[in-house]
Amino acid sequence: MVDNLNILRLLCDKALHKQVLLLAIPMVLSNITVPLLGLVDAAVIGHLEHAWYLGGVALGSTMISVAFWLLGFLRMSTTGLAAQSYGADSGKQLAIVFTQGLFMALGFALAFIALHSFIADFVFSVSSASEQVKHYGQQYFSVRVWSAPAALVNYVLLGWLLGTQNSKAPMWMVIIVNSTNIALDILFVVGLGWKVEGAALASVIADYSGMIFGLCCVYKTWQQKQLPKLLTLVKDTSHGLSRFIKLNRDIFLRSLCLQATFTFMTFQGASFGDDVVAANAVLMSFLMIISYGMDGFAYAMEALVGKAFGAHDKQQLSRSLIGTFFWGLVICAGLTLVFSFAGSSLVGLITDISKVADTANIYLPWLVAMPLVSMWCFLFDGIFIGATKGQEMRNSMFGAMCVFFGLFFGFSDMGNHALWLAMLGFMAMRGMSLGVIFYRQWREERFFMV
């Protein structure tokens, strides 16, 4: 791609590092508020008089989170397409991408609201939770479902703003949503005593607060770039719509494979006993730290690659890859050192139950290897999202899922070690397969082909 001398020259380029970090760091900072929100939710609801309140919120919020997470393709596809339009300096296409994403988000939201009672009836009918937990889970779900329009539109807003190389606005969007949620959680649940419904209402208001802020940011960008008025674009929304739908379909199928893998990890771990499932939960929190750290750089990669892809600028793309991979390597090397020398201490901070901590320390070496193995899949995901190559991502994820299940069942006599071996293989396969596809397409001059 570039020779060693050029790589060294780029690594000394302060402007390149500034460009990467200005996109990545705001998203890393905003990601920090996500686990903080979870901790506050658990603390506020967990101090009510009965455990089933916390169980109901956990069940209801999981249903919402899974549904919204599976629709996360709205952000990914919007980021890639918006960045390409931005790189191609096509204001009209940039506006069309936003319009298409907005209509699709609202369509999915209305469908989800219309079907939510059927979804709830099905999930609660197959759940083995107690009647009290189901009752409060239903109560939480029936309120929280009204956040769907805002939550899904927020995906589009985040993706579009990132695509225009603006990471500060998405950062503040996420911070506003989570900080509003935390403040209203305390007010509604502790101050006003609204319990489960209060927690759900706090999330609804928070999502709409983030949406209002995001729309203001989009409006400001719209005015600055003198994009066409929204109403004049309605008749043009069909332009490129088939590509948009196909891309979203492929990313959705990819997300299903990813969800299947992590769901199996949780349920299979539970079959190994209470200490193991608790230890896995501790270690999975470390995996989330890796994810939060690398997601910021993956988002930067999406925006930079999309811009270069839209401009058909190979030199700009090479700069983006080298800068982002360098910082990804720095972050993951740092996490590896932390887990190597302070992993046991971190486990002790999360749990003071000796059996759980001892069990977690047995499987800790798998986490030590995870950052440097998994960084490639996060960054290559960013490359292929920026290039809007959904089919390759879908196929890669399906292959990685097959590797995961193959490794687990092939080494199932190792028990929980087999699960972590499978997860490490899953992460490695995602990065390797996308890396091979990228190398071939680049060498054969096919990477810039849509």
Image (cartoon, rainbow, N blue to C red):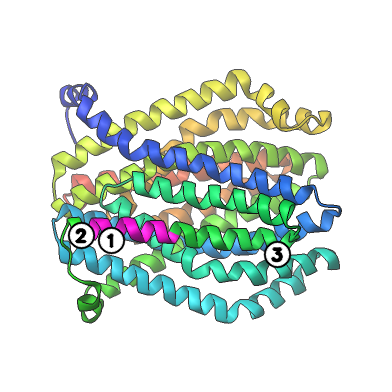
Amino acid type at circle 1 is Tyr
Is the Cβ of the residue at disc 3 closer than 8 Å to that at disc 1?
Answer: no
In the rendered view, does 252 fall on the left or right side of 89? right
Count every numbered label the image shows and give the total.
3
Is the Cβ of the residue at disc 1 closer than 8 Å to that at disc 2?
Answer: yes
Amino acid type at circle 2 is Gln
**Residue 56 seen from this side:** yes
In the rendered view, does 5 fall on the left or right side of 127? left
- Tell which circle, 3 or 1, labels the residue nearer the N-terminal end: 3
Residue 8 at x, y percent in the picture: 21, 21
- Tell which circle, 3 or 2, labels the residue nearer the N-terminal end: 3
Q: Quarter of the image for the C terminus: give it.
A: bottom left
Query: What residue do we see at 71% from left, 51% from top?
Result: 268
In this figure, which residue is indicated by the disc labeled 3?
Answer: 197
Above or below for 329 versus 264? above
- The answer to which of 430 and 323 lies nearer the viewer is 323
Q: Secondary structure at mark 3?
A: helix
Q: What whole-number distance in Å separates the C-alpha atoms at marks 3 and 2?
A: 39 Å
The range drawn in magenta is 211-222
In this figure, which residue is indicated by the disc labeled 1?
Answer: 219
Q: What whole-number distance in Å separates the C-alpha atoms at marks 1 and 2?
A: 6 Å
